[in-house]
Image: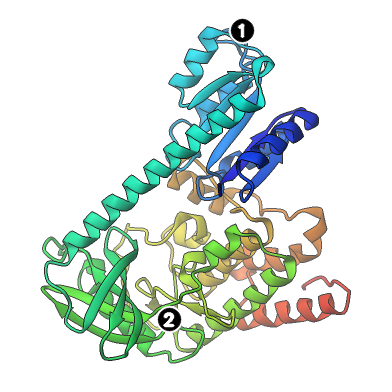
């Protein structure tokens, strides 16, 4: 069974005991074990993307109101987070009252630690994983149903095979193109019948992306094969990347060498975009695709803006993009330039090196406030030689940030050369 499990326990020997027995259940799975202090630090960045089931061993106290109940306190913290993985509570103490309260707070199972056996542990995790699989299947079915209803009539020349993904504005299909004789990613706008007349984002959504991408013809930028409208809906036929995106690659874990290699490639791609007079404004790992030769290509220029004022697309007071990757000036609604992409690249850099986002929270506003006010994130000790590079990309003020993608690329190239030679260097 393949699964991503996280074990949390203050007792190192018990962590290894659980790791061993869950390894028997999930021989092909990825099992992470950490102590309570490590879990506390990782709490805000723990999501279902990186963990299918969390096995949490902690004190649950003598009653539901016991201030010493760290387990109940954590469950209260995460109960309103839809992206948090399901939790199996392993109680070091507790009783029937704390068991009931733990389940009320969202735990999918509650097991007294003193009564735990390998069979009970494996059964609990097996049932939890089954629930995860059923939920994923239901979501996939709803996604397919939603996407199928989107196309009242097939787009001539394209044979749609499956859904690659969707947002509130568009669905992306894997389709075969009769004209090209190959697969394409077919992006179709979701609902043209109810546009907001005051919001230019909903008028000719894909036309703006088509204009941005076709003005930049370069291997590091996605190729657009076709653009048009059918049945009242815009569509784009784009290059299909069978290897997937950087987000999936990060989830599998990256070495420092691979992270720096991707970082330099993305910076070079941004250099091409910026020299064409455009900045991306929605740079994040799902928008960085991987080619068969492991080079990158940027996609999704729907929010791109011309540095000279064309392609202007943001309605005043409306934030666009992912809050995890927004620059402070973007979060504040201030004027933007290409340095906003440098900041987003810094967030990606941190995520590639550590496997987690620098800022996380219980809401988008919480995350945005951290981009504006929180201290710069620190890298682990073994990566501290890269801290000056990270600081140069994540400076709160654009004026203190590295000035261009070309500067970032050259700095990373220098670090890679010195690393290959067995040395490290500070970035000025």
Q: Quadrant for residue 200, please give it.
A: bottom left
In the image, taking residue 160 as reference, residue 328 lies left or right, namely right
Q: Quadrant for residue 178, please give it.
A: bottom left
Mark linked to residue 277: none
In the image, taking residue 282 as reference, residue 112 lies left or right, namely right
Q: Could you tell me residue 364's position as x and y percent?
A: 44, 47
Q: Could you tell me residue 102's position as x and y percent?
A: 51, 19
Residue 144 versus residue 319: which sits nearer the camera?
Answer: 144
Residue indicated by mark 2: 307
Task: Give the structural element (helix, strand or loop) at label 1.
Answer: loop
For the point 33% across and 78% down, the residue is 209
* Precedes in sequence: disc 1 or disc 2: 1
Question: Dot 2 surroundings within 10 Å: few (below 14), some, or many (20 or more)?
Answer: some
Q: Is residue 73 above or below residue 298?
A: above
Residue indicated by mark 1: 62
Question: Dot 1 surroundings within 10 Å: few (below 14), some, or many (20 or more)?
Answer: some
For the point 50% across and 55% down, the residue is 324
Can residue 40 be seen in the rendering of this structure?
no
Split into 4 quadrants, where in the image is the C terminus? Answer: bottom right
Task: Give the structural element (helix, strand or loop) at label 2.
Answer: loop
In the image, taking residue 79 as reference, residue 176 lies left or right, namely left
Q: Quadrant for residue 38, please give it.
A: top right
Q: Could you tell me residue 166's position as x and y percent?
A: 32, 61
For the point 16% across and 82% down, the residue is 156
């Amino acid at each position: 069974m393949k699964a991503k499990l996280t074990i949390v326990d203050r007792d190192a020997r018990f962590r290894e005991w659980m790791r061993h027995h869950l390894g028997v259940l999930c021989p092909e799975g990825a099992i992470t074990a950490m102590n309570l202090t490590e879990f506390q630090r990782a709490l805000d960045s723990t999501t279902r993307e990186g963990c299918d089931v969390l096995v949490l061993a902690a004190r649950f106290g003598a009653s539901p109101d016991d201030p010493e109940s760290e387990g109940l306190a954590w469950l209260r913290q995460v109960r309103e987070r839809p992206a948090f993985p399901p939790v199996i509570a392993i109680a070091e103490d507790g009783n029937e009252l704390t068991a009931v309260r733990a389940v009320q707070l969202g735990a999918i199972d509650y097991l007294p630690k003193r009564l735990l056996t390998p069979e009970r542990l494996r059964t609990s995790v097996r049932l939890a994983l089954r629930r995860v699989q059923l939920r994923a299947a239901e979501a996939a079915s709803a996604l397919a149903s939603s996407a199928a209803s989107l196309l009242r009539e097939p787009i001539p020349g394209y044979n749609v095979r499956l859904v690659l993904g969707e947002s509130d504005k568009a669905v992306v299909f894997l389709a075969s193109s009769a004209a090209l004789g190959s697969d394409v990613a077919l992006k179709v706008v979701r609902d043209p019948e109810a546009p907001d007349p005051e919001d230019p984002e909903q008028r000719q959504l894909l036309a703006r992306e088509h204009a941005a991408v076709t003005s930049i013809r370069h291997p590091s930028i996605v190729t657009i094969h076709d653009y048009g409208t059918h049945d009242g809906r815009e569509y784009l036929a784009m290059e299909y990347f069978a290897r997937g995106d950087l987000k999936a690659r990060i989830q599998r874990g990256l070495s420092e060498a691979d992270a720096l290699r991707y970082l330099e490639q993305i910076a070079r791609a941004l250099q091409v975009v910026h020299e064409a007079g455009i900045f991306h404004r929605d740079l994040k790992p799902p928008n960085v695709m991987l080619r068969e030769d492991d080079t990158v290509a940027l996609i999704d220029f729907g929010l791109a803006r011309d540095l000279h004022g064309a392609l202007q697309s943001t309605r005043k007071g409306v934030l666009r993009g992912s809050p995890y990757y927004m620059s402070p000036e973007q979060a504040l609604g201030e004027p933007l330039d290409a340095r906003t992409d440098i900041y987003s690249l810094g967030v990606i850099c941190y995520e590639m090196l550590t496997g987690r986002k620098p800022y996380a929270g219980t809401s988008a506003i919480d995350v945005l406030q951290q981009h504006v006010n929180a201290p710069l994130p620190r890298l682990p000790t073994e990566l501290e030689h890269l801290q000056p590079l990270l600081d140069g990309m994540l400076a709160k003020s654009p004026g203190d940030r590295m000035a261009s993608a070309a500067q970032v690329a050259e700095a990373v190239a220098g670090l890679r050369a010195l690393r290959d030679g067995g040395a490290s260097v500070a970035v000025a």
